[in-house]
């Protein structure tokens, strides 16, 4: 069980956006977008997250948690690589819409996977502690990445996005070392007479 949790922490580390966050606005400005356009692009991302949260939850129920998480990492990898070649408001808008989808594929799904793993072993009481540690791992990796992002940007503006794509891609092999949890049948409603 300890090995599985450590691999889960490693997976959660790949959810970092630390390379992206410190340089995204100046990068889009360098590509010719004004602040109003950047605000629009960011708003598309946020509205996309709101709109995608429920449908992607159902998708996770249908596909399985691990496959949904893998899809989220694959789309994030593609989006971050897309930043390297994007140069218009339309391109950045499309990327942000895709990224919002990727974000919602992973947001509740990773916690649901952990909870189901713990429930299978009658360890539900450990969820808050382990989930909190996983979040701390991701935030620590994000902080470290953010500290290097500015320097990497001065070397080549594409490097922070390429680095974020690489980290997201690393999540894929880690995910496939985690167990795919068995589906739990949804109890049928009973009729009372």
Image (cartoon, rainbow, N blue to C red):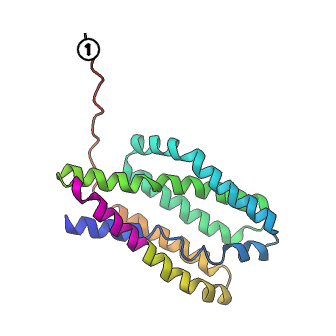
Mark 1, secondary structure of its residue: loop
- Specify the quadrant of the image occupied by residue 12: bottom left
Where 145 sits versus 15, above or below? Answer: below
Q: What segment carries the magenta color? A: 124-138
**Residue in the picture at 30% in, 68% down:** 7
Q: Residues within 10 Å of mark 1 (few under 14, many from 20)?
A: few
Residue 193 or 30: which is nearer the viewer? Answer: 193
Q: Position of residue 117 (x, y in %)?
A: 25, 54
Marks counted in the figure total: 1
The quadrant the C terminus occupies is top left
Q: Is residue 169 left or right of residue 11?
A: right
Q: Position of residue 104 (x, y in %)?
A: 51, 52
Q: Which residue is mark 1?
A: 192
Q: Is residue 92 left or right of residue 150?
A: right
Residue 162 or 46: which is nearer the viewer? Answer: 46
Q: Position of residue 41 (x, y in %)?
A: 72, 60
Q: Is residue 48 left or right of residue 68?
A: right
């Amino acid at each position: 069980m300890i090995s599985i949790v450590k691999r889960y922490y490693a997976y959660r580390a790949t959810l970092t956006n630390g390379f992206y966050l410190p340089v995204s606005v100046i990068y889009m400005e360098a590509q010719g977008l004004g602040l109003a356009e950047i605000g629009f692009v960011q708003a598309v991302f946020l509205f996309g997250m709101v709109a995608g949260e429920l449908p992607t939850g159902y998708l996770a129920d249908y596909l399985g948690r691990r496959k949904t998480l893998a899809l989220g990492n694959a789309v994030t990898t593609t989006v971050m690589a897309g930043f390297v070649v994007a140069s218009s408001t339309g391109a950045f808008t499309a990327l942000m819409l895709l990224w919002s989808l990727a974000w919602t594929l992973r947001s509740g799904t990773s916690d649901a996977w952990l909870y189901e793993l713990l429930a299978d072993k009658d360890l539900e009481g450990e969820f808050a502690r382990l989930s909190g540690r996983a979040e701390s791992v991701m935030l620590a990796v994000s902080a470290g990445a953010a500290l290097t992002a500015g320097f990497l940007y001065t070397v080549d503006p594409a490097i922070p996005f390429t680095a974020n794509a690489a980290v997201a891609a690393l999540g894929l092999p880690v995910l496939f070392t985690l167990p795919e949890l068995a589906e739990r049948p949804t109890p049928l409603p009973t009729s009372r007479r």
